[in-house]
Image (spheres, rainbow, N blue to C red):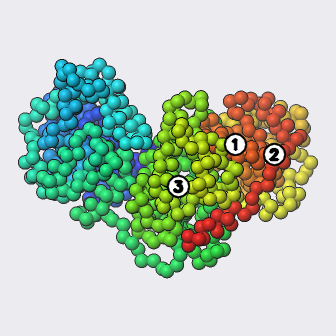
Amino acid sequence: MRARLPHTTGYVDRDGVKLHYELYGEGSHTIVFVPTWAIIHSRSWKAQIPYFSEHFRVIAFDPRGNGKSDRPDDPSCYSLDKIVGDVIAVMDHTETEKATLVGMSFSSAIAFAVASYHPDRVEAVVSTGAWSPIVPPYEERARAYDANAEDNPEGWKKYNADYWLRDYPDFIQFFMSKVHNEPHSTKQQEDAVGWGLQGDGAMLRMTQDARSDSAALVIDENMYRRVRCPSLIFVGAADEITPPETSHRIAELTGGDLHVVPEAGHGLHGRFPALFNTTMRDFLAKHLGTYTPVRRRLKPGKRALYLSSPIGLGHARRDLAVTRELRRLHPNLQVDWLAQDPVTRFLDANNETIHSASRLLANESAHIEEECGEHDLHAFEAIRRMDEILIKNFMVFQEVLEEGRYDLVIADEAWDVDHYWHEHPELKQAQIAWLTDFVGWVPFEENGPREAFLTSDYNAEMIGHVEGNPTVRDRAIFVGGSEDIVDMSFGNGLPRMRDWIPRHYEFSDYIIGQHPDEFGSRDDLRAEFGYDDGRLTCIVAVGGSGVGATLIRRILEAYPLAKARLPELRMIVVTGPRLDPAGFKVPAGVEMRAFVPNLDRHLAACDLALVQGGLTTCMELAAAGTPFLYFPLRNHFEQNFHVASRLERYNAGRKMTFAEAGPEQIAEAMLAELRNPRIPLPVAKDGAARAASMLSELL
């Protein structure tokens, strides 16, 4: 799912070659993201466009040869003068008088060429990983162009255009591993390979041949000297595609601002987008007078910004409980919430203050829903594929902190903030307390070695962040006890979770929104809801997303089988807001409801519950002592490992494997839990108060 969609799309006809463009945002200044070498297309700017289009009018277009643009089969169509002309043509077509041009690698040269040959059309140039003929390429890359060279290094010989024709996919894999050569760059590599495979070797060879044949436009040192607009030149000191000396020389010739990133490679705008975006924003503000965060004058008093994960309402319920306890300790504390739907609806109902910037957040829960299959959510990959949304939301958060003074940020599984502040500690603007109920990505054995490698790599990056920058988190709170840590390793060569987590976290015990002990007696609850009429009440609640439809249908098939053996059994199915109760075939004796207010109270009063594997609902059932079956989503590592391990410790719930649980098996399990209910361990009542006490020390 994309963080932002264009409001206008179209094509520019360039002598029969159609160029696809997209327009985003509004503003008095325009940014044009110039497409680089036709090996990839405009999606390579996905970490920049959603953010900058909040403050600027933004144009992106695909290069001739890739994406949605045409792919001419004549090498002359890929000449430098035509590609420079493409930029002007897109600007003319979109009625753009002047713009900031942003170029990467090959398109750095194109952006500077436009600024040199058409100075009245360019306000500024931002370059990253610059390619230019003014500095010779790496020697091994130059030798690789010679098909007959006997000393071509193994691997680098793939730079030879003949190889592109023989095995283009292998070349793309090789090349993109050089573009994103930094540790922990697997997602950037995968994206770039996917974009690259939309092209082909023959087209790419034509682009290379056309560079040497261009005579109408010259890229030399004099061209750079003629540039009069301000320029920002990023370069990664570890660039393996173009020598960093190229960017240094361009900065000397243009007088541009050189920004060296020591640990970065060629595609640093993709690998380190938070650094790239904030630096580019501040550069444009300095030279063009465009947007920059300005600290607002605020009333005196303590202020906290609360970030509550929108993936399930369980986070919001526990976060509200923590906030109420924190206000007992600091009655005048102002808490602002940076949150998304459906969390904002819950907070509104509880009279909490939602920060106005919340409207700018890209919706994470909608992305998760799109990732769902039939009782299937590959949670790890869903988070990986949410990278575009996470960087957009981090930039919103960062500006909130830069504009408003906060004494404390409370981040409940705000993965973006934790990641980017650890990656760039200089961006940190306030004390931060990190809350989570699990630590560690876990692979499924059946998903093979690639998933095991990726989860281990992500865990290694997280461990490196925490150990390398121990002062980023002012407090790290594990929502549970040390016994709730799953007994597993972080991956090959990494520590065990039960050894590492206690060294870097404090424990609040479990935090429950409202403990069932506060509901009154079970008999009173049953009388309140009409569950005291001699029947046994079973409630089915599978969350608010569409992924629960398949489970509901299977449970409805199981109900007649169970009722035949237990005639006093009745069932209430709560479909949630995204499923229509009328869309199910309902057997007699089943009540279908789209919504039940105070569902946690109903779950505490019923005789049996059937739920998915989410931690919040399962722990509420455990606290109430209600027997339940839970069905973890397939490929959901948190539900299958972290949650299941915790529930086993509490002796709560019966774990069901959806793929193996037909209607007969479900009916049998229902009857077994009703006849022999297990007695769970007590669930803490004071977890919220403990967490609030830890947070209070930071205030």
- Residue at position x 49%, y 80% in the image: 300
Per the image, the residue denoted by label 1 is 644
Per the image, the residue denoted by label 2 is 627
- Looking at the image, residue 270 sits to the left or right of residue 72; the answer is right
Q: Position of residue 107 (x, y in %)?
A: 22, 43
Residue 391 lies, with reference to residue 524, above or below; the image says above
- Looking at the image, residue 59 sits to the left or right of residue 502; the answer is left
Considering depth in this image, is 182 or 495 the residue closer to the camera?
A: 495
Asked if labels 2 and 3 touch by Cβ distance under 8 angstroms, the answer is: no
Considering depth in this image, is 123 or 228 the residue closer to the camera?
A: 228
Going by the numbered disc 3, the residue's amino acid type is: Ala
User: Could you tell which of marks 1 and 3 lies nearer the N-terminus?
Assistant: 3
Per the image, the residue denoted by label 3 is 414
Front position among marks 1 and 3: 1
Label 2 Cα crowd, 10 Å radius (few <14 / some 14-19 / many 20+): many
Q: Residue furthest right?
A: 534
User: Could you tell which of marks 1 and 2 lies nearer the N-terminus?
Assistant: 2
| Residue 594 appears in the picture as rendered | no
Query: Mark 1 falls on what kind of element?
Result: helix
